[in-house]
Protein backbone atom coordinates (compact mmCIF):
# COMPACT_ATOMS: atom_id res chain seq x y z
CA UNK A 1 0.00 0.00 0.00
CA UNK A 2 2.83 2.35 0.86
CA UNK A 3 4.51 1.47 -2.38
CA UNK A 4 1.34 2.42 -4.28
CA UNK A 5 1.18 5.79 -2.50
CA UNK A 6 4.77 6.48 -3.38
CA UNK A 7 3.99 5.57 -6.99
CA UNK A 8 1.13 8.08 -7.07
CA UNK A 9 3.33 10.74 -5.60
CA UNK A 10 5.94 9.99 -8.22
CA UNK A 11 3.41 10.32 -10.97
CA UNK A 12 2.24 13.63 -9.53
CA UNK A 13 5.81 14.81 -9.37
CA UNK A 14 6.39 13.81 -12.98
CA UNK A 15 3.15 15.55 -14.06
CA UNK A 16 4.21 18.66 -12.20
CA UNK A 17 7.56 18.62 -13.91
CA UNK A 18 5.92 18.09 -17.31
CA UNK A 19 3.51 20.91 -16.58
CA UNK A 20 6.16 23.34 -15.40
CA UNK A 21 8.88 22.44 -17.85
CA UNK A 22 6.92 21.59 -21.00
CA UNK A 23 3.24 22.43 -21.01
CA UNK A 24 3.34 25.84 -19.36
CA UNK A 25 6.16 27.19 -21.61
CA UNK A 26 4.32 25.81 -24.62
CA UNK A 27 1.16 27.56 -23.51
CA UNK A 28 3.05 30.80 -22.94
CA UNK A 29 4.65 30.49 -26.39
CA UNK A 30 1.29 29.75 -27.94
CA UNK A 31 -0.15 32.83 -26.22
CA UNK A 32 2.68 34.97 -27.64
CA UNK A 33 2.05 33.55 -31.09
CA UNK A 34 -1.64 34.31 -30.75
CA UNK A 35 -0.92 37.86 -29.58
CA UNK A 36 1.50 38.43 -32.45
CA UNK A 37 -1.00 36.99 -34.89
CA UNK A 38 -3.70 39.29 -33.51
CA UNK A 39 -1.39 42.29 -33.81
CA UNK A 40 -0.50 41.32 -37.34
CA UNK A 41 -4.16 40.80 -38.15
CA UNK A 42 -5.02 44.25 -36.79
CA UNK A 43 -2.22 45.78 -38.85
CA UNK A 44 -3.42 43.96 -41.95
CA UNK A 45 -6.97 45.18 -41.32
CA UNK A 46 -5.78 48.76 -40.79
CA UNK A 47 -3.71 48.63 -43.98
CA UNK A 48 -6.64 47.14 -45.86
CA UNK A 49 -8.98 49.83 -44.52
CA UNK A 50 -6.47 52.55 -45.44
CA UNK A 51 -5.97 51.09 -48.90
CA UNK A 52 -9.72 50.67 -49.28
CA UNK A 53 -10.31 54.32 -48.37
CA UNK A 54 -7.58 55.37 -50.81
CA UNK A 55 -9.05 53.21 -53.57
CA UNK A 56 -12.53 54.55 -52.81
CA UNK A 57 -11.26 58.16 -52.84
CA UNK A 58 -9.47 57.61 -56.16
CA UNK A 59 -12.59 55.97 -57.58
CA UNK A 60 -14.73 58.90 -56.41
CA UNK A 61 -12.24 61.40 -57.89
CA UNK A 62 -12.25 59.50 -61.17
CA UNK A 63 -16.05 59.38 -61.22
CA UNK A 64 -16.24 63.11 -60.44
CA UNK A 65 -13.74 63.87 -63.21
CA UNK A 66 -15.67 61.71 -65.68
CA UNK A 67 -18.93 63.34 -64.54
CA UNK A 68 -17.53 66.83 -65.18
CA UNK A 69 -16.16 65.72 -68.54
CA UNK A 70 -19.54 64.25 -69.48
CA UNK A 71 -21.37 67.40 -68.35
CA UNK A 72 -18.92 69.55 -70.32
CA UNK A 73 -19.36 67.37 -73.43
CA UNK A 74 -23.14 67.44 -72.99
CA UNK A 75 -23.16 71.24 -72.63
CA UNK A 76 -20.93 71.57 -75.69
CA UNK A 77 -23.25 69.29 -77.67
CA UNK A 78 -26.30 71.28 -76.50
CA UNK A 79 -24.63 74.55 -77.46
CA UNK A 80 -23.79 73.16 -80.88
CA UNK A 81 -27.35 71.90 -81.27
CA UNK A 82 -28.82 75.29 -80.31
CA UNK A 83 -26.47 77.10 -82.68
CA UNK A 84 -27.36 74.70 -85.49
CA UNK A 85 -31.06 75.34 -84.77
CA UNK A 86 -30.42 79.09 -84.83
CA UNK A 87 -28.66 78.76 -88.16
CA UNK A 88 -31.52 76.68 -89.56
CA UNK A 89 -34.03 79.28 -88.38
CA UNK A 90 -31.90 82.05 -89.83
CA UNK A 91 -31.71 80.28 -93.17
CA UNK A 92 -35.40 79.32 -93.18
CA UNK A 93 -36.94 82.50 -91.84
CA UNK A 94 -34.45 85.28 -92.37
CA UNK A 95 -32.52 84.37 -95.50
CA UNK A 96 -35.48 83.15 -97.55
CA UNK A 97 -37.65 86.14 -96.65
CA UNK A 98 -34.82 88.55 -97.36
CA UNK A 99 -34.04 86.94 -100.73
CA UNK A 100 -37.72 86.95 -101.74
CA UNK A 101 -38.15 90.58 -100.71
CA UNK A 102 -34.96 91.77 -102.47
CA UNK A 103 -35.80 89.87 -105.66
CA UNK A 104 -39.27 91.37 -105.74
CA UNK A 105 -38.02 94.93 -105.15
CA UNK A 106 -35.10 94.76 -107.58
CA UNK A 107 -37.24 93.43 -110.45
CA UNK A 108 -39.08 96.75 -110.57
CA UNK A 109 -37.84 98.76 -113.62
CA UNK A 110 -38.11 101.99 -111.68
CA UNK A 111 -35.86 100.66 -108.91
CA UNK A 112 -33.36 99.42 -111.50
CA UNK A 113 -33.32 102.81 -113.24
CA UNK A 114 -32.76 104.67 -109.95
CA UNK A 115 -29.92 102.32 -108.98
CA UNK A 116 -28.21 102.79 -112.37
CA UNK A 117 -28.65 106.54 -112.26
CA UNK A 118 -27.07 106.70 -108.81
CA UNK A 119 -24.15 104.50 -109.92
CA UNK A 120 -23.50 106.43 -113.16
CA UNK A 121 -23.64 109.83 -111.49
CA UNK A 122 -21.44 108.61 -108.64
CA UNK A 123 -18.82 107.21 -111.02
CA UNK A 124 -18.73 110.40 -113.07
CA UNK A 125 -18.59 112.61 -109.99
CA UNK A 126 -15.59 110.72 -108.64
CA UNK A 127 -13.96 110.57 -112.07
CA UNK A 128 -13.66 106.81 -111.86
CA UNK A 129 -14.48 106.04 -115.47
CA UNK A 130 -15.69 107.44 -118.78
CA UNK A 131 -16.24 104.07 -120.44
CA UNK A 132 -18.92 101.91 -118.88
CA UNK A 133 -21.83 99.58 -119.60
CA UNK A 134 -25.02 99.08 -117.64
CA UNK A 135 -26.67 95.70 -117.05
CA UNK A 136 -30.15 94.87 -115.83
CA UNK A 137 -31.64 91.58 -114.70
CA UNK A 138 -33.18 89.22 -117.23
CA UNK A 139 -36.53 89.59 -115.46
CA UNK A 140 -36.60 93.38 -115.96
CA UNK A 141 -37.83 94.84 -119.30
CA UNK A 142 -34.79 96.73 -120.61
CA UNK A 143 -36.90 99.13 -122.71
CA UNK A 144 -38.71 100.34 -119.58
CA UNK A 145 -35.39 100.95 -117.80
CA UNK A 146 -34.11 102.85 -120.89
CA UNK A 147 -37.20 105.02 -120.90
CA UNK A 148 -36.82 105.81 -117.22
CA UNK A 149 -33.10 106.61 -117.55
CA UNK A 150 -33.65 109.05 -120.40
CA UNK A 151 -31.57 109.79 -123.48
CA UNK A 152 -29.02 111.89 -121.64
CA UNK A 153 -27.90 109.01 -119.39
CA UNK A 154 -28.16 106.41 -122.16
CA UNK A 155 -25.68 108.41 -124.28
CA UNK A 156 -23.06 107.93 -121.58
CA UNK A 157 -23.24 104.14 -121.91
CA UNK A 158 -20.94 102.34 -124.35
CA UNK A 159 -23.87 100.53 -125.98
CA UNK A 160 -26.26 103.50 -125.74
CA UNK A 161 -28.67 101.21 -123.89
CA UNK A 162 -28.81 98.90 -120.89
CA UNK A 163 -27.89 95.28 -121.50
CA UNK A 164 -29.75 92.27 -120.15
CA UNK A 165 -27.58 90.02 -117.94
CA UNK A 166 -28.06 86.63 -116.30
CA UNK A 167 -29.10 87.57 -112.75
CA UNK A 168 -32.54 87.69 -111.13
CA UNK A 169 -32.87 91.30 -110.03
CA UNK A 170 -30.93 94.53 -109.58
CA UNK A 171 -28.27 96.10 -111.81
CA UNK A 172 -24.54 96.13 -112.52
CA UNK A 173 -22.27 98.84 -113.91
CA UNK A 174 -19.10 97.70 -115.63
CA UNK A 175 -16.16 100.16 -115.79
CA UNK A 176 -14.22 98.96 -118.83
CA UNK A 177 -11.17 101.18 -118.39
CA UNK A 178 -10.89 100.15 -114.73
CA UNK A 179 -11.75 96.47 -115.40
CA UNK A 180 -14.17 96.73 -112.50
CA UNK A 181 -17.85 95.90 -112.06
CA UNK A 182 -20.03 97.67 -109.51
CA UNK A 183 -22.48 94.99 -108.45
CA UNK A 184 -25.94 95.86 -107.16
CA UNK A 185 -27.57 92.65 -108.33
CA UNK A 186 -30.11 90.93 -106.10
CA UNK A 187 -27.50 88.56 -104.66
CA UNK A 188 -25.06 91.37 -103.86
CA UNK A 189 -27.82 93.40 -102.20
CA UNK A 190 -28.89 90.39 -100.09
CA UNK A 191 -25.32 89.89 -98.88
CA UNK A 192 -24.96 93.59 -98.14
CA UNK A 193 -28.22 93.85 -96.21
CA UNK A 194 -27.65 90.59 -94.35
CA UNK A 195 -24.46 91.94 -92.78
CA UNK A 196 -26.34 94.82 -91.21
CA UNK A 197 -29.66 93.32 -90.18
CA UNK A 198 -28.68 89.72 -89.33
CA UNK A 199 -27.57 90.76 -85.81
CA UNK A 200 -30.83 92.56 -85.12
CA UNK A 201 -32.79 89.61 -86.47
CA UNK A 202 -30.89 87.17 -84.23
CA UNK A 203 -31.56 89.38 -81.21
CA UNK A 204 -35.25 89.54 -82.10
CA UNK A 205 -35.48 85.75 -82.38
CA UNK A 206 -33.08 84.57 -79.67
CA UNK A 207 -32.45 87.56 -77.43
CA UNK A 208 -28.68 87.34 -78.06
Image (spheres, rainbow, N blue to C red):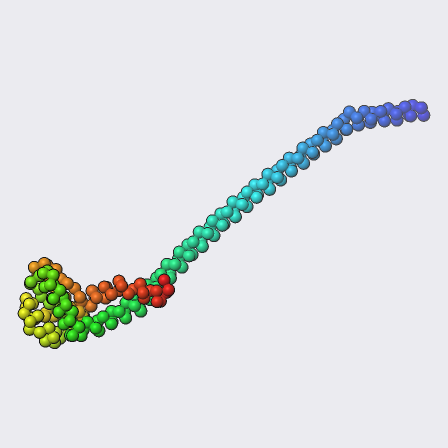
**Quadrant in the picture for the N terminus:** top right
**Quadrant in the picture for the C terminus:** bottom left
Task: State which quadrant residue 5 falls in.
Answer: top right
- Tell me residue 79's x, y (percent): 39, 59
- Tell me residue 58's x, y (percent): 52, 45
- Tell me residue 31's x, y (percent): 72, 32
Residue 143 can be seen, yes or no:
no
**Which residue corresponds to the image point at 24% horizontal and 65% vertical from the top-left?**
193
Q: Is residue 52 left or right of residue 206?
A: right
**Which residue corresponds to the image point at 54% horizontal and 45% vertical from the top-left?**
57
Q: Is residue 3 above or below residue 40?
A: above
Q: Is residue 54 left or right of residue 87?
A: right
**Which residue corresponds to the image point at 33% horizontal and 64% vertical from the top-left?**
202
Judging depth in this view, the residue of 14 and 97 nearest the camera is 97
Task: State which quadrant residue 8 falls in.
Answer: top right
Q: Is residue 204 above or below residue 49?
A: below
- Tell me residue 99's x, y (percent): 24, 69
**Which residue corresponds to the image point at 49% horizontal and 50% vertical from the top-left?**
64
Q: Residue furthest front?
A: 125
Q: Residue furthest right?
A: 1
Residue 188 can be seen, yes or no:
yes
Task: State which quadrant residue 115 falls in.
Answer: bottom left
Q: Total of numbered circles in the picture?
A: 0
Judging depth in this view, the residue of 50 and 187 nearest the camera is 187
Amino acid sequence: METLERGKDKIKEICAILKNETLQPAQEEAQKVIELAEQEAHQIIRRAESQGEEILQKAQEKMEKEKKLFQSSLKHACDQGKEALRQDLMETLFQKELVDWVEKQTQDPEVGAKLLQALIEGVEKEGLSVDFSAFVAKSVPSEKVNALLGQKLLERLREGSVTVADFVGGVQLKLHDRKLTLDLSDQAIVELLAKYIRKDFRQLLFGA
